[in-house]
Image (cartoon, helix red, strand yellow):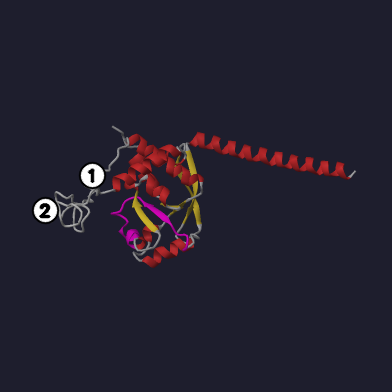
Amino acid sequence: MANSKKLEIKSKKSEVKAKSSVKASANAQKLRAAVKKTGELSLDLFDIKGKTAGKIDLPKEIFGAKINNQLLAQAVRVYLANQRKGTAETKTRGEVHGSTRKIWRQKGTGRARHGSKKAPIFVHGGIAFGPHPRDFSLKISKKMKRQALFSALSSKLKSNEIKAVTGLEKLDPKTKSMADVINNLGIDKKKRNILMITPLKNDLENVYRAARNLEGVRILNANVLNTYDVLNNRLILLMDKAVDSIKENFANAKIN
């Protein structure tokens, strides 16, 4: 009897799980269907006090793109390589300034044979295999670069690491005002690693002044957005008007 009761309870639990999974899949299908119809994704929009101010539509082609990990790795590698200056330089024994005379006679001194004081074995001598100026830059096509950015933004949205904010343009150009906004959004100070995306720098000088001195906050204009900065920060703080700037600069831009 006890075994039969246990079997009945297990069967009921499995039925409940099956029903919940069916409901979840149905909701997911409805969401996909809605996205297909509208071509847009939605995200909660917060004001500077941390309260919900509605929803913001995100273009599916940018924030709902297929995540390509191989392309992301390639884009990050190219970006980091292109940041290298390649100006490190050392002198070889032929470039070191000094006399070329033999420092002591060949035989009879009891010491090892040497010809030049500029040999790499001596202090202040040349460097045998030191660095020399070189070009570290790598290339990636514009189409791949754009697709990598879309893939990075889609990955952040899928991981719930994007917050949309409105009203930042009304802030005073003070560090405290931006710090209050970040605290109102519930972002832990110890885990702060934020990339703030703005539409245009010239129109938002107060936002740049308020955010530039905050530890763990990096602020970027939408037209210079790149895959590395998106992936290298834990949270994306997206201004509501920056969505149109991203769409204009990347989605609608012509690729030659």
Examine the rendering and report whether any part of residue 47 can be seen: yes
Examine the rendering and report whether any part of residue 251 can be seen: no
- Give the position of the N terminus as an image quadrant: top right
The answer to whether 10 appears left or right of 200 in the picture is right
Q: Which residue lies furthest to the front in this view?
A: 108
Q: Is mark 1 on a helix, strand or loop?
A: loop
Which kind of residue does numbered mark 2 sit on? Lys
Task: Report the magenta residues as a range.
Answer: 189-209
The answer to which image quadrant residue 3 occupies is top right
Q: Residue furthest top?
A: 256
Residue 83 x, y percent position in the rendering: 29, 48
Q: Name the residue under label 2.
A: 102
Residue 69 x, y percent position in the rendering: 45, 39
Residue shown at 33% from the left, 46% from the top: 80
Q: Is residue 190 magenta?
A: yes
Q: Does the magenta stretch include residue 160?
A: no
The answer to whether 238 appears left or right of 201 in the picture is right
Which kind of residue does numbered mark 1 sit on? Arg
Of pointers 1 and 2, the one earlier in the residue sequence: 2
1 or 2: mark nearer the eye:
2
Q: Distance between the residues labelled 1 and 2?
A: 34 Å
User: Residue 134, which numbered label?
Assistant: 1
Q: Relative to 181, is 135 above or below?
A: above
The answer to whether 93 appears left or right of 184 in the picture is left
Q: Which of 199 and 192 is in front in this view?
A: 192
